[in-house]
Image (tube, rainbow, N blue to C red):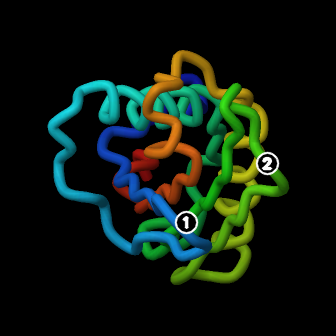
Amino acid sequence: MLTSSRCRLAAVAFATALAGPAFAAEPPAKHPDHKHDAAFTEIRDQVASKWLVVPGLDGADQVHVRVRLKLDQSGRILGQPDVTASGGPVATRTALANSAYRAVVNAAPFKNLPLDKYADWKEVTMHFEAGDLGL
């Protein structure tokens, strides 16, 4: 749902890669440690607070955006976020990918992440669908 042109993400799927350069394509099974869930909720909420989406983008309901991040222990992004978008018209795909990139960069450094669970959130892959964007 959009509020003042700010995107509120209702149900963003997160996945982690705990080792190596590969990233999980689907969300992990529910982790029993609530601190783990809290880290991903915190990242999601911080990105959502910075995500501005232009309403009325043609074919936005067909676009899937994936953002890959590597974070240091203080929540700063290491290198550049890897943002890819698929589906929908090229112009809409580009607009949503660019807005996702800006949201992630503007949200960093991510705060309130449990340092004792750094191995769980040092690499993050976020998947966004049109429904997550309120489009």
Outermost residue, right direction?
79
Cα gap from disc 1 to disc 2, whole angstroms: 17 Å
In percent of the image, x 52 and y 33: which residue is there?
43
Mark 1 is on which residue type? Arg
Label of residue 66 in the image = 1
Sooner in the amino-acid sequence: mark 1 or mark 2: 1
Choose mark 1 or mark 2, whichever is in front: 2
Q: Nearer the viewer, residue 48 or 44?
A: 44
**Residue 127 on image: x %, y %:** 45, 61
27 shown above or below 9: below
10 relative position to 124: left or right: left
Quadrant housing residue 47 = top right
Mark 2 is on which residue type? Leu
9 shown above or below 59: above
Quadrant housing residue 67 = bottom right
**Residue 94 on image: x %, y %:** 73, 70
85 shown above or below 56: below
- State the SS at label 2: loop
The mark tally for this picture is 2
**Residue 61 on image: x %, y %:** 42, 67
In percent of the image, x 46 and y 26: which residue is there?
116
**Residue 80 on image: x %, y %:** 82, 56
Outermost residue, top direction?
112
- State the SS at label 1: strand
Quadrant housing residue 21 = bottom right
In percent of the image, x 77 and y 33: which residue is there?
106
**Quick one: quadrant of the N terminus?**
top left
* Circle 2 residue: 78
88 relative position to 78: left or right: left
Dot 1 alpha-carbon crowd within 10 angstroms: few under 14, some 14 to 19, many 20 or more: many
26 relative position to 84: left or right: left
